[in-house]
Image (cartoon, grey):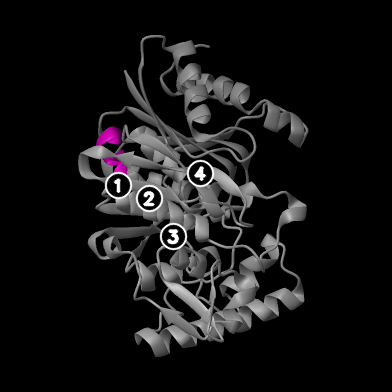
Amino acid sequence: MRLLVCSDAFKEGADAPTVCSAMARGIRIVFPRASVDECPLADGGEGTARILTRTLKGDWTDVSVLDPIRRSIKAGYGWVEEDATALIDMAEASGLQHLLPGERNVMEATTFGTGQLIRHALERGAQTIYLGLGGSATTDGGMGMASALGIRSFSGGRAIDYPAGAHLARIDHIDQSAAHPLLAKATFRILCDVRNPLFGPRGAARVYAPQKGASESDVSVLERGLQQISQLWKETFGQDVSQHPGAGAAGGLGAASLLFLRGELVSGAETVLDLVRIEERMARAQLVLTGEGSLDEQSLQGKLIERLAVRAGRQQVPIIALCGRLQLTADQLQSSGLLSAFPIQAGPITQQEAIQKTSEHLEQTAARVVATFFGRQV
């Protein structure tokens, strides 16, 4: 008997490897000799690089870089020697995870540390770099990253060493003459599942900056700054990337990746599923178990679980979801591609208790589900 367990993290409750391990333990309660393929997943956001490094049997490399507010930290990236591939999450260096709530200052936050990770990978010989854009603390239009890669910003003739959101409206000159020479020799694939433009009602400042500590007046300043830096890019490089879907991701790092890295913005979820060869693994399984912290209408709008269901359908293998909360109607569930879905709590429980017992409940529910599916008693 062969089963595949593949899931993203349950937010706050368990990371993806823990979720998959818990499901696998539940399966083995009922079928001790079952062959269980554990495949932790991510969607291109925070944690994606570590998941892929583990799955692709790469090595993790720690580097001294600057965090969003320019403190020295250790951040890392994955390295697959076989094909000289680097796996980088911008959140490793420039994510909200590094800041306490009171430290969030989007006006001063920079992606410089992300540029340092890219630089390290380039100098190691990276031919392909995957860059995940989720979890950012920044709205600097990616100019901090560019600075770390030798692309300098100036205001009134003075260099800005660590460009941040507050600088965008003041930058009047960009000098690419010292850009890292290896930039042109690497292929960049930018993992991004948001479609927001750089500025405007759905842009980086208005939609995402408030989550990073921006006040209403900060949002106005950032919006003007993003508009002005976009105009400067257009005048300097002859390119307008501002309205490209995903340009506003990670505070404008999506746009900067198009412009300075010559990257291709690709679906994080689809790229991860391709890299882990999910359909090959599904084809060998009699049943697929997946999971989601909250299974709701948004889950069916291009998120990881919906894309898993599509691929399971191609392979004609049944897929069942376990979830913290089930908020789909019967009709939505029927059209989702999932065979079924089950909440992992057996009865009323507080949110804190549910979070604390996520692994335990996943194990118990996985045991009940596979027993029912294969006609066994637990």
For the question of whether residue 41 can be seen, the reply is: no
Considering the numbered disc 1 on the image, is that residue within a helix, a strand or a loop? helix
Counting residues from the start of the chain, the first of labels 3 and 2 encountered is: 2
Nearer to us in this view, 330 or 354: 354
Residue that mark 1 sits on: 124
Residue mark closest to the camera, 3 vs 2: 2
Question: In the figure, 174 relative to 19: above or below?
Answer: below
Q: Residue furthest bottom?
A: 235
The residue depicted at 57 percent of the width and 45 percent of the height is 73
Most prominent secondary structure in the magenta stretch?
helix
Residue mark closest to the camera, 3 vs 4: 4
Magenta residues (range): 274-282
Amino acid type indicated by mark 4:
Ala
Tell me the distance, in whole angstroms, between the alpha carbons under discs 4 and 2.
11 Å
Amino acid type indicated by mark 2:
His
Residue 309 image offset from top left, x and y in percent: 40, 45
Residue 62 image offset from top left, x and y in percent: 45, 39
Is 378 positioned to the left or the right of 220 in the image? left
Residue that mark 4 sits on: 75
Residue that mark 3 sits on: 192
Considering the numbered disc 2 on the image, is that residue within a helix, a strand or a loop? helix
